[in-house]
Image (cartoon, rainbow, N blue to C red):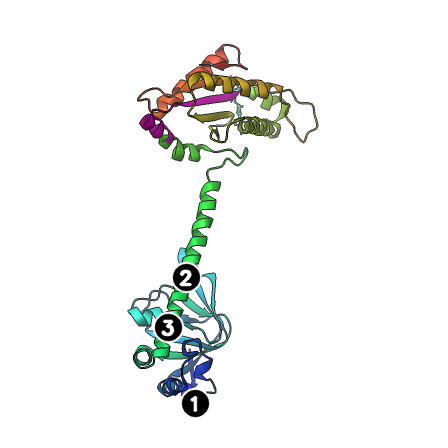
Amino acid sequence: MELLTLFGRSDYKARDLQLFNDVEQHDLDIITKTLSASCVMLVNAGQAVISAHTTDNRLYIVLSGKLEVVSNEHNGSTSTNLQYSVGECVGELSVLDEEDQPHTVIAVERSELLVIEADTLWNLIDNVDGVARNLLRLLSFRIRTTNALLRRRHKVGEFYRQMSMIDGLTGIQNRSWLNSQFPQMIEHAHATGNSLSIIMADLDHFKEFNDKYGHIVGDDAIQSAAKILNSTLRPTDFAVRFGGEELLVILPDTENQDCFTVAERLCNKLEQTSIFSDTRRPLPHITASFGVATLADGQDLSSFIEAADAALYRAKNAGRNRVSF
Ligand SMILES: Nc1nc2c(ncn2[C@@H]2O[C@H](COP(=O)(O)OP(=O)(O)OP(=O)(O)O)[C@@H](O)[C@H]2O)c(=O)[nH]1
């Protein structure tokens, strides 16, 4: 930064600066006098005004140009879109609490800054009520802005968290979702005594289907099967892509026989639905086999899934396209 002149010798007026807005003429005279020996500095575009993690107990007020906060996370500087325009100030927190600067602030364009040393600012706070009031207003504005930013970040984080739990091919829940939610469902069922049933579904002769029609068409088939499952369930049920062509349906508050009935409905619907594909070739209907299990007293997650797998195995052995306990 290059020293241009002193504030008292420049054409800039204290009343045009946010921190000194709306103060009495008498107070404005004190402010002007106090700031007369403060420096007006020049900073070029891209140059740092404040460096992160340094103690810089000075307040900077933008007299011309524009400043911007940049984030130094992940070893690179990225824009935060948090900018300071003419009249606005930056660095007040470090003056007040004497802590390190959390962020780097750079000049977006060639800018002139009024630099107020900590002693001078404290002098103004102690002697001019209007400055103390404006500083409080500024701090509450900063808190609100930070809170809004945190809320937005939380929302974006939650969006990505949800997305990471959805299977890319079918749009139904994936294994990550299962790992994070299923243990709690089992715990809840044990704690409340409510029944919890699952259906493990596996497409029949799918290797043959893939070999004959290709993997892309195979993907279409998995998509269709997932869609059918998902659209046939209650809003409280969940469809999960358990593995390649294996889908798991979770039915809370459902007894074994009711679960069997749901599985039969799914089995029939899948058998009757044709698979659509871009190839415009007629495709055979696909079928799946279904294994049903209901959570037993004290049963843990893996043996619950194993029970459904064993039932699925029996359905496959009994000729496929059917449901088995
Ligand atoms: N297109 C496609 N195929 C998949 C996907 N995931 C798994 N598969 C295929 O699904 C087939 C499963 O074959 P197998 O486990 O031998 O079982 P199957 O041929 O369906 O025979 P049964 O289950 O005994 O009726 C394999 O060929 C896998 O490559 C996928 O995401 N897309």
Which residues make up the magenta segment?
185-204
Above or below, 225 relative to 72: above
Q: Which residue is mark 1?
A: 9
Identified by mark 1, the residue type is: Arg
Q: Which residue is labeled 2 in the image?
A: 144
Front residue of 182/53: it is: 182
Which picture quadrant has residue 288? top right
**Percent of width and height locating residue 144:** 41, 61
Label 2: how many Cα within 10 Å (few below 14, some 14–19, many 20+): few
Q: Between marks 2 and 3, how big is the CA–CA gap? A: 14 Å
Q: Earlier in the sequence, mark 2 or mark 3?
A: 3
Query: Does the beta carbon of the residue at mark 1 sit less than 8 Å from ligand 1?
Result: no
Can residue 188 be found in the magenta stretch?
yes
Q: Nearer the viewer, mark 3 or mark 1?
A: 3
- Per the image, label 3 sits on a secondary structure element best described as helix
Residue 204 visible in the current orientation: no
Residue type at numbered disc 2: Arg
Cα distance in 3D space between marks 1 and 2: 36 Å
Residue 95: quadrant of the picture: bottom left
